[in-house]
Image (tube, rainbow, N blue to C red):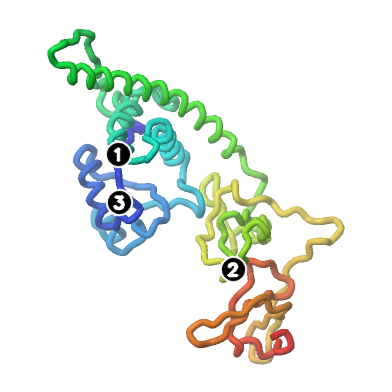
């Protein structure tokens, strides 16, 4: 792979059609169609329009794992490079970042990549594009000379920042991607709760880890698919940095979650521990239920009709 990048300005409001048009405008005309793409789980990439378009163009879409902006390290590193560029060079009002992107892209693609030991330009085209500014100035056209000097200074700054950015990124990347714990399919793991939204009003007082949850599958080298309760409406694949192996407590202070009771009709029935809150939704009163033996991540809003066996708690 050449490691070539294209920094494309857009907004968070871009639709699936906008994304497709940006691809044609900035990428397809230079490289043709890819066989695979990697993107986050934004709504633009999950809509029927883009899925069908990818199908017709024979492109395999790959979505990142939950709460991680990548499925591999390449996307992560490139995202961080862009952020470093922008932090160093945007104005205080942050209204000039679009104008910086072309030179930032050129500087990155014309710098030696640590993985390939060559520049993306050379890997892709077999030569290095020329960028040189002479020393001869003309006092009769001062604005032209000023602009040329600005371009030279900006490019030197950007080229220097590429090396610094890559050093920083490699350091933090290596820290985040240490070999995961000895977690296997079937093990129970704790899930970092920092990205999980709950009904609790004060995030600082919420549980830092939730679970434990059973590992159903290993996804690649740095992600796991977990067996989540239906109340957690998130994608069940998580990066290894967000999970930790549950170790047995020799003092029994961490009992397993109890199984549901089975009614004579064959239906599962869970025991209410206490009612935490109430609200009105569509002219119906609902109660926030904490289920006995389960953590806060399993709390659910239930109508009164679902609490026949727990009227005392209501």
Residue at the farthest right position? 251
SS category of the residue bearing label 3: loop
- What's the mark number on residue 278? none
On the image, the x and y values in percent for residue 176 come to: 58, 39
Nearest the eye: 221 or 149: 149
Q: Which residue is mark 3?
A: 59
- What's the mark number on residue 98? 1
Q: Residue at x 25, y 19 (%)?
A: 131
Q: Residue at x 50, y 26 (%)?
A: 167
In terms of image quadrants, where is residue 306?
Answer: bottom right
Nearest the eye: 157 or 41: 157
Q: Is residue 309 visible?
A: yes
**Mark 1 and mark 3: Cα distance apart in space:** 29 Å
**Mark 2 and mark 1: Cα distance apart in space:** 38 Å
Q: Which residue is mark 2?
A: 199
On the image, the x and y values in percent for residue 203 come to: 62, 59
């Amino acid at each position: 792979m050449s490691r070539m990048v294209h920094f494309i300005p857009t907004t968070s409001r871009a639709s699936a059609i906008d994304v497709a048009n940006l691809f044609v405008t900035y990428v397809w005309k230079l490289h043709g169609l890819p066989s695979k793409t990697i993107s986050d789980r934004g709504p633009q990439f999950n809509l029927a329009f883009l899925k069908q378009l990818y199908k017709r163009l024979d492109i395999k879409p790959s979505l990142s794992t939950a709460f991680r902006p990548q499925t591999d390290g390449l996307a992560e590193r490139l995202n961080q490079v862009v952020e470093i560029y922008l932090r160093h060079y945007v104005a205080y009002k942050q209204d000039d970042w679009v104008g910086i992107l072309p030179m930032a892209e050129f500087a990155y693609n014309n710098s030696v990549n640590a993985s390939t030991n060559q520049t993306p330009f050379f890997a892709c085209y077999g030569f290095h594009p020329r960028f040189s500014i002479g020393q001869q100035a003309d006092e009769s056209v001062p604005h032209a000379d000023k602009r040329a000097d600005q371009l030279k200074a900006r490019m030197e700054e950007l080229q220097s920042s590429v090396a610094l950015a890559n050093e920083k990124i490699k350091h933090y990347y290596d820290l985040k991607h240490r070999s995961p714990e000895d977690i296997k399919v079937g093990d129970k793991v704790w899930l970092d709760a920092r990205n999980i939204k709950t009904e609790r009003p004060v995030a600082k007082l919420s549980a830092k880890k939730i679970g434990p949850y059973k590992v159903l599958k290993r996804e690649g080298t740095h992600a796991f698919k977990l067996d989540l309760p239906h109340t957690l409406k998130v994608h069940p694949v998580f990066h290894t940095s967000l999970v930790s192996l549950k170790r047995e407590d020799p003092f029994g202070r961490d009992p397993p979650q109890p199984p549901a009771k089975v009614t004579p009709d064959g239906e599962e029935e869970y025991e209410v521990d206490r009612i935490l809150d109430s609200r009105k939704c569509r002219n119906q009163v609902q109660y926030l239920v904490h289920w006995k033996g389960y953590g806060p991540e399993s709390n659910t809003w239930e109508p009164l009709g679902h609490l026949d066996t727990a009227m005392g708690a209501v």
